Image: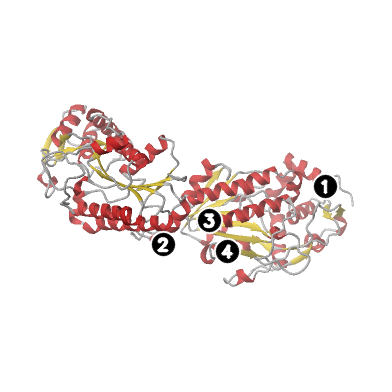
Amino acid sequence: MTSGPILVTGAHGFAGSHVVEELRQAGADVVGWDRVDLDLLDPAALRPALARLRPAGICHCAGAPHVAQSWSNATLALETNVMATAHLLDAIRDLVPGCRVLNVGSATVYREAADALTEQHPVGPASPYAISKLAQEMLALRMHRDEGLDIVQTRSFNHTGPRQQPAFAAPSFARQIALIEAGRSEPVIRVGNLSARRDLTDVRDVARAYRFALERGVSGAVYNVCSGSAHAMQELVDGLCARAAVTVRVEVDPALYRPNDTPFVVGSHERLTADTGWQPGIPLGQMLDDLLAYWRAQVRDGRD
Amino acid sequence: MTGRAKIVEVLVTGGAGFIGSNFVRFALNQHPDWHVTTLDKLTYAGRRENLHDVMDNPRHTFVHGDIADAAVAGPLVERANVVVHFAAETHVDRSIQAAGEFIHTDVVGTFVLLEAARRAPALRRFIQISTDEVYGSVPSGASRETDELKPRNPYSASKTAADRLAYSYWATYDVPVIISRASNNYGPYQFPEKVIPLFTTNALMDIQVPLYGDGLNVRDWLYVDDHCRAVDLLIEKGTNGEVYNVGGGNEVTNKELTTRILDALGKPHSLIRPVADRQGHDRRYCLDTTKLKGLGWQPATDFEHGLTATVEWYVANDWWWRPIKEQDAAFRAYYQAQYDHRTP
């Protein structure tokens, strides 16, 4: 990479904030941008800011992350994931064409499958969110192919950890348990479809994968970022309940079911491991410990 | 994407100094949607007292720190929408005694701020406060923004370096820099080492006023409020990468200035003590301000009214200046080193 800082978009967001920490710990000069600082949909603001900064690398984490919300608000996902990325890629091409870009994509682009997903598996996005992430990915890969930009593309599977919004399943469970422990909720947690099995990775492993992909990934390559093992939501709930200081009853709420919920998703990170040496390092037990510890602290400090 | 009612984040470096504190006060009064952060090292001329009436203002934050310290200045610049960079060592005589601090603050400090400005995603303006002294002494006519820069003392050389460095960050990195080159400012809260407050406060204490050389050096005096309005206008309407002269259009010799101050205070001219001239004393500065006037600016305060208001401010605010002169050992030491050995 040429000299210059590493820019992280969506730096105040869930994955972005962990990527900032990961890069800083690795000694990189990191600049974080977030929507409160700069609207990627506003080229008049974006372009001069990028021209000033001249980053050597960009980790594009900004986006609308929630699949369920995209059913009711597809335009938000399309604007935030597709249009913002299109503006960013245009600006990169025009202003900092030598910059290495990690474009964070999603495994929801894959068609449903019964076995582990590799990057060769056919795509078939099933939600507005997934459609937006596929469009974002295809824009980036076209920029690599036709315009010569140095782009690495991920397809990231589910990940969780501290700072993820409780609109997602795992932090929602952890938050509810922390509230029950603090005596602020009835000892019941409400859950959605617990039979769904997901490939779930700790966000800190994901952040490290992004750093490795940025540093060592092959230009133009697509990489799954995943743990390689599937966990039933039931397993997460049981694991968190077992860690709770009080007895918790689990209640299934059909309202929390997603439309078109895929029963089983697991990925293969073989390619990422082969090209960059990355391996997941944080086991499920530690992930749950840390998630619950984070929410206990949030509840204690009144930030729940 | 979203239409938020936005607070404009304004960073004022050197906001506890003379012009800076006047600008902070002006900005808070003028712009209810601004949040102003003052970053000031609080050397001798930067004083909390200069901001006494805005320290508790919820739209004002004071940060004590050095602009050349990237760990302090960097994050403040990075989140700013507007930076107004006043912080500088400013006194020519001090630069002749010792130039090191001038290089550190005026040049390195500006470099640190500009580097941070490259990382500021929402930065709209970076106002580099420069000075008419970058043109050097002009025997006749008026300096235009395109004139050659011929600084002749360490202070003006350090300001010229900062002026051109700021310009280069616009030309190279598109940092939204505007450079203002102002003439000599005067008004409330100016440290009593500069001629108007020095002579005013000396006369109020019935001690002699040391007049350099033949007293015929000419300065173009700008009332500090007019300067504040010019900076405000440049933030709103200036063009990035451009230089704007800001001059009051009041050419006055130091001798005439001295007699006016003494007359305003009803003090005898016998207080004037001629002293040997400053080394390399620039004879005259004069600015052509056509370009700024094209944006709609005019000085609003003529010299007579501005000087009277300033002298009256010092008369009414001896709580502000008397401790500097009477108790501040550093000021006494400086003053003695500067004037005591000089005989005409």
How crowded pointer 4 is (Cα within 10 Å; few <14, some 14-19, many 20+) is rated as some
Q: Where is mark 4, residue-wise?
A: B242
Q: Where is mark 3, residue-wise?
A: B172
Asked which secondary structure carries label 3, the reply is helix
Evaluate whether residue A171 shows in this view: yes
Q: How is the image coloured?
A: secondary structure
Identify which residue is drawn at 79% across, 51% down.
B202
Q: Quadrant of residue B232?
A: bottom right
x, y percentage for residue B228? 60, 61
Front position in the image: B82 or A52:
A52
Q: Which three-letter amino acid code belongs to the residue tagged 2?
A: Ala
Q: Where is mark 1, residue-wise?
A: B339
x, y percentage for residue B208? 84, 51
- Report the Cα–Cα distance between label 2 and label 4: 20 Å
Q: Is residue A278 above or below residue B177?
A: above
Residue A52 shown left or right of residue A34 in the figure: right
- Report the Cα–Cα distance between label 3 and label 2: 18 Å
Asked which secondary structure carries label 2, the reply is helix
Q: Do dots 4 and 3 share one subunit? A: yes
Chain bearing tag 4 is B
x, y percentage for residue B339? 82, 47
Which-is-in-front pick, marks 4 and 3?
3
Tell me which label, 1 or 3, sits earlier in the chain: 3
- Report the Cα–Cα distance between label 4 and label 1: 39 Å
How crowded pointer 2 is (Cα within 10 Å; few <14, some 14-19, many 20+) is rated as few
Which-is-in-front pick, marks 4 and 1?
4
Which-is-in-front pick, marks 1 and 2?
2
Tell me which label, 4 or 1, sits earlier in the chain: 4
Q: Which three-letter amino acid code belongs to the residue tagged 3?
A: Thr
Identify which residue is drawn at 40% across, 52% down.
A37
Q: Which three-letter amino acid code belongs to the residue tagged 1?
A: Tyr
